[in-house]
Amino acid sequence: MPDIYIAKKEEKEKTQTKSKKGPIKEPVVTAAESKQETKKEEKDVKKKVIEEGTTNPLAAFMSKPRNLRFETQEQKEKVVLLLRRHLVTNIPWLVAATAMAIFPFLAVRILPLDFIPSSYRLIIFITWYLLTFAFSFEKFLSWFFNVNIITDERIVDVDFPSILYRDISTTKIDQIQDISIKVGGFVRSLFNYGDVAIQTAGTVPEICFEAVPRPGRVAKILNDLILEEEQEKIDGRVR
Amino acid sequence: MTPFERLIQSLASMTFSPWIFVKLLFLIGLLIYIAFAVIVVRQVALMSRTIDGNFSLPIKLFSWVHLGAAVAIFVLALVIL
């Protein structure tokens, strides 16, 4: 007998046995089970964030940072994510600082500075390096303290536009209306950093996280937190 | 010789060095720099209060070292220039 007939026979037998078993029953999901599932999902989001966590205080993407507190933080409020501008954004001022550090050695060789007394030359030399240090320190402070914080309750944007100004804007997670990300240009695409613009229904119409690493992941975490917040509202667990 | 004539004579015999003017400019500049360094210390304290993390202490230390260096250079300029 050709193989084709044997195969057809087997198929026939299979269909017969299926029809004997009757229709397949769909699993019934109860309210308690769905609640457990949502809780599990919430846990998974938190777990994912913890897994990515870093204890490096100079990281630009810090999830669940330890020993970090901010001025307006409430007691039960937990920091989920702390963001700074991507490390790559520091390269221009690092190059400038290096050039400033090298300049005196070149100036001594190129410029005719013999008419300046040695004591004045020494003071100029030391003052130049003090200014170089001040320039670098200022740039570092500007990078280090300009942070975006995402907590389980709200988002905080801390800006120090200059040494004498401080600008802190806050909005609650449930007031977020829209999240959009912008990653444009060669360097930004290469190092995967960009802007995350958050439209809010609060007094601050828009909060922008500028040049933060992994903007897609940030948007995903924010979306998860919004869903979590909505679930908390439904369950009546709002703080 | 009257006292007025003596004053005129002493002023006429005085040799003016441009480096004294430069020294004065340096000292004024360094004084302004010390004021700036004080503001940096103050601002770092304020920033650290806003965001308090593991790295706050070294940054505060750096700002104080910066202020100390500014004062030391001012004193050095006052002595050697």
Image: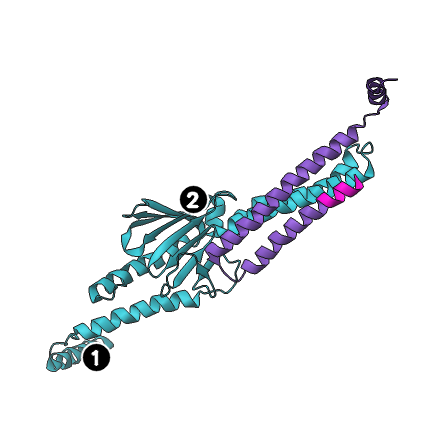
Which one is closest to the eye, mark 1 or mark 2? 2
Q: Which residue is nearer to you in this view: A228 or A145?
A: A145
> Where does the image place residue A93, in percent across and percent down from the top left?
58, 44
Asked which quadrant contains residue A69, the reply is: bottom left
**Mark 2 is on which residue type?**
Gly
Decide if residue A7 is on the left or right side of residue A156: left
Q: In the rendered image of this protein, does residue B19 appear above or below residue A144?
A: above
> Where does the image place residue B39, in percent across and percent down from the top left?
56, 46
Query: Which residue is at 41% across, 56% downward?
Result: A149
Dot 2: what SS? loop
Q: In the rendered image of this protein, does residue A115 appear above or below residue A129?
A: above
Among numbered discs 1 and 2, the one appearing first in the sequence:
1
* Main secondary-structure element of the magenta-colored stretch: helix
Q: Which chain is cyan?
A: A
Query: Which residue is at 43% across, 44% downward?
Result: A184
Query: Which residue is at 51% across, 55% downward?
Result: B48
Q: Which chain is purple?
A: B
The residue marked by circle 2 belongs to what chain? A
Decide if residue A178 is on the left or right side of residue A149: left
Query: Which residue is at 30% across, 68% downward?
Result: A41
**Mark 1 is on which residue type?**
Ile
Q: Which residue is nearer to you in this view: A59 or A159?
A: A159
Decide if residue A159 is on the left or right side of residue B21: left
Neighbour tally class for label 1: few under 14, some 14-19, many 20 plus, Cα within 10 Å: few
**Residue denoted by label 1:** A6
> Where does the image place residue A50, in percent across and percent down from the top left?
42, 67
Residue B75 falls inside the magenta stretch: yes
Measure how far apart labels 1 and 2 are at the Cα level: 61 Å
Q: Which residues are magenta?
A: B74-81
Q: Where does the C terminus of chain A fall, quadrant-wise?
A: bottom left
**Residue denoted by label 2:** A184
Q: Which residue is nearer to you in this view: A1 or A208?
A: A208
